[in-house]
Amino acid sequence: MSRWLSRTAMLIALLLAFTACSRIGLAYRNLDLIIPWTLNDYLEINGEKKDWFNERLKEHLSWHCTTQLPGYLDWLDRLKIMVQTNRVTDQALQERTREAKAAIAETARQITPSAIELLQGLNDDQVDDMDAAFVKDQRKRQQQYLKPTLQEQIQERSARMEKRLNDWLGPLNIAQRQRVVAWSTALGDQNQQWIANRAHWQNQFSAAVAQRHNPDFPQRIEQLLVNRESLWTPAYREAYDNTEAQARSLLVDLMADSTEPQRERLLKKIDGVKKDFSDLKCLKAARS
C-alpha cells in the first residue's frame, strides 16, 4: 500500500493503478515508504532506536489502516465505475489525482513528527552515511537514466510502460503501442529534469539534517516531506505539469482504443487490489 501512495505523488492516480498496486501486501508492511523518501534506503537504524521505530511504525500502521484505507476502497470504486461506464476522461482523471494527492498529504502530515524525532536522534556517522547514500543514489540514476542517448531513453521508457500496461490490460494492440511511443516521445528529456530535481531535494534534505538541532528544524523537515512541491526547481515544475498532462492524455486514448477483454482484465485487477486491502487484518479488526 505504501508503495502505491508514494508513487501516486509522482504520477496521476490511474496510471499508478496500472503500475504499482500489485505489491500492496508486502509494501504495506513498510509504512516508512509512505512518506516521500525511503528510510531504509538511506539510514541504518539499530539498537534502541530500531525498537522505537518499530513501535512508531505499528502506531502509524494502525492509524493508517483504520482511518485511511476505507477511503482508498472508495477511491478504487470510483476508478472502477470510470472503466465500467467508459468515462475515463481528462476531467475524471484530474479528480482522481487530486483525491490521491490529498491522501498522500494527510499521511505525510501524520508521519512527519515521527520522522523529525528520528532524524533529530541521528549521530554524525549516521548522517554521513545518509549523505553518502544520497550521492550513490544520484550516480546510479544518472547512469541508468541519463547515460543513454535521448532516443534510447525514449525507447526504454516506452518499453517500461508497455510492460506495465500489459500486466493490467493484457497485450496492447497496434494503435495502443503506437500511442505509448508517442507519449514517451512527448516527454522528451523529462529524465534530466526529474533527476536534477531529485538531487536538489536530497541536497536540501542533507542541509536540513546537518542543522537538526536548530529550532527551525521541524519546520524545514515538514516542508521537505509534506510541502515538497514548494521546493521544486522551476524547470521540474514545468516538466511535471507536462508529465501529468501527457499521462492523462495517454490513458484516455488507451481506454478509447481498448477492447472488451482488456477492460474486463483491468476491472479484475482493480478488484484484486480492493481484495488486498480488504484482507488486511487491521482493516478487518477495525470493522468488526
Image (cartoon, rainbow, N blue to C red):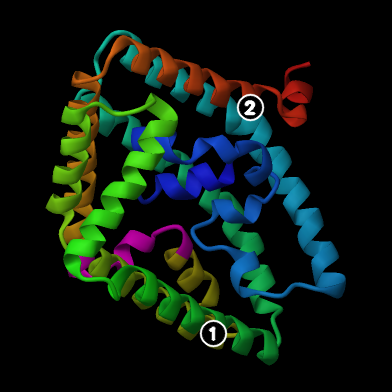
Secondary structure beneath dot 2 equals: helix
Q: Is residue 111 above or below residue 80?
A: below
Q: Is residue 58 magenta?
A: no
Q: Is residue 189 above or below residue 268?
A: below
The location of residue 69, given as percent across then percent down, is: 59, 30
The residue carrying pointer 1 sits among few (fewer than 14), some (14 to 19) or many (20 or more) residues within 10 Å by Cα, namely many
Q: Is residue 13 left or right of residue 40?
A: left
The location of residue 158, given as percent across then percent down, is: 27, 48
Q: Is residue 156 above or below residue 29?
A: below
Secondary structure beneath dot 1 equals: helix
Q: Nearer the viewer, residue 121 or 125?
A: 125
| Residue highlighted by disc 1 | 131
At label 1, the amino acid type is Asp
| Residue highlighted by disc 2 | 276
Q: Is residue 233 left or right of residue 116?
A: left
Figure quadrant of residue 85: top left
Q: Is residue 233 magenta?
A: yes
Q: Image point 42% across, 29% down: which residue? A: 168
The first of marks 1 and 2 along the sequence is: 1
The location of residue 42, given as percent across then percent down, is: 60, 73
Q: Image point 57% across, 45% down: which residue? A: 2
The location of residue 257, given as percent across then percent down, is: 19, 20
The reply to whether residue 195 is visible in this rendering is yes
The residue carrying pointer 2 sits among few (fewer than 14), some (14 to 19) or many (20 or more) residues within 10 Å by Cα, namely some
Marks 1 and 2 close (CB-CB < 8 Å): no
Figure quadrant of residue 75: top left
Q: Nearer the viewer, residue 31 or 157?
A: 157
The reply to whether residue 13 is visible in this rendering is no
**Location of the C terminus (image quadrant):** top right
